[in-house]
Amino acid sequence: MPELVKIWTVTPIGVGRADYSKSVERQTESVTRSWQEDYQEAKIILDIPPGSSVTEEIDTGINNVVLLYDLRLVTEINVLIGLEIQEQATTGEWTTIYKQLGYTRIIDKISKGLPIFRNYRVIAYNFSNVPIDVVFSTSGIKTTRETYELELISGGG
Amino acid sequence: MPAKQINFRYNIEASKGVELEYEITEDGWLTEGFMHFPDGCNALVYARVRLGISGTIVQVTPIENDYIALNDANFPFLIDYQVHKKDKILVEIINYDSVNPHQVSVIITWASERTLR
């Protein structure tokens, strides 16, 4: 019979399982949450000076994605106005994603939707020689980029 | 042809290392060896086999000076060493699992004559 001649202590490097114990492994899988709701936003912008513009920043919340389908910018007198929409990049910089001009009103339908992944801002231009008030309104849908962990447990072993 | 299996089964405690020794009782050949690592070892139990032949130590499990560490696996290996009475088989088993003991088997085959496969 073999003899035990030496026994010593070692520094462990991990944790196994008891011999032939049931193998229970846990894993998680990211699943996109299916959620969306109507999105509306309206801003009244008062007293835009002649030949100038006013910027309004709109917060869409953390991890949200907004798709804008209708854009409106309306004023009360027949003057040339402009609408510019800028989206904030992850670096914090603003990028123009929409620009339009119109007399009295700008009404646009975007069939594919204008996607906003972070905050956006509306710039209303007044190209006339009198101060004007405008109303900006938009509608679309709002969804999320949040995911949740689906836990799968497999038994065996 | 006379042959026998020498069994070095050992239930090793967590964070322990052991060396088992067997003294050869008859001249002959060590032909092959076999290791078994139960499921749960998770490659944390290391084992190797060395021979003490005429005062010289040689390792017969791969790789020289290294250990085999497997999980839920058998590891057969060829030895093909001539041995004489009083030579020794040294089996080293080290359990790096911090919690669980593991029962590892090492079986060495001795034969009176050389057998080549």
Image (spheres, rainbow, N blue to C red):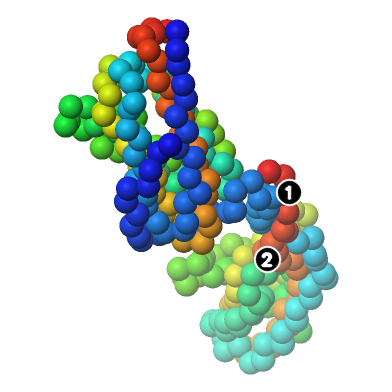
Of tags 2 and 1, the one toward the viewer is: 1
Q: Which mark is residue B104?
A: none
Q: Position of residue B84 (x, y in %)?
A: 26, 21
Residue drawn at (67%, 87%) of the image: A45
The residue that label 2 is drawn on is A146
Residue drawn at (59%, 43%) of the image: B39
Few, some or many residues within 10 Å of mark 1 (<14, 14–19, 20+): few
Which amino acid does the dot numbered 1 rest on?
A: Gly
Residue drawn at (33%, 16%) of the image: B29
In the image, residue B78 sits, relative to residue B51, either above or below, namely: above
Few, some or many residues within 10 Å of mark 2 (<14, 14–19, 20+): some
Residue A139 showing in the rendered view = no
Q: Circles 2 and 1: CB distance less than 8 Å?
A: no
- Mark 2–mark 1 distance (CA, rounded to whole Å): 29 Å
The residue that label 1 is drawn on is A155
Q: As rendered, which of B39 and A102 lies closer to the eye?
A: B39
In the image, residue B91 sits, relative to residue B112, either above or below, namely: below
Q: Chain of mark 1?
A: A
- Secondary structure beneath dot 1 equals strand
Q: Position of residue A128 (x, y in %)?
A: 61, 81
The answer to whether marks 2 and 1 sit on the same chain is yes
User: Which residue extends farthest right?
Assistant: A38
B6 left or right of A141?
A: left
User: Which residue extends farthest bottom?
Assistant: A47
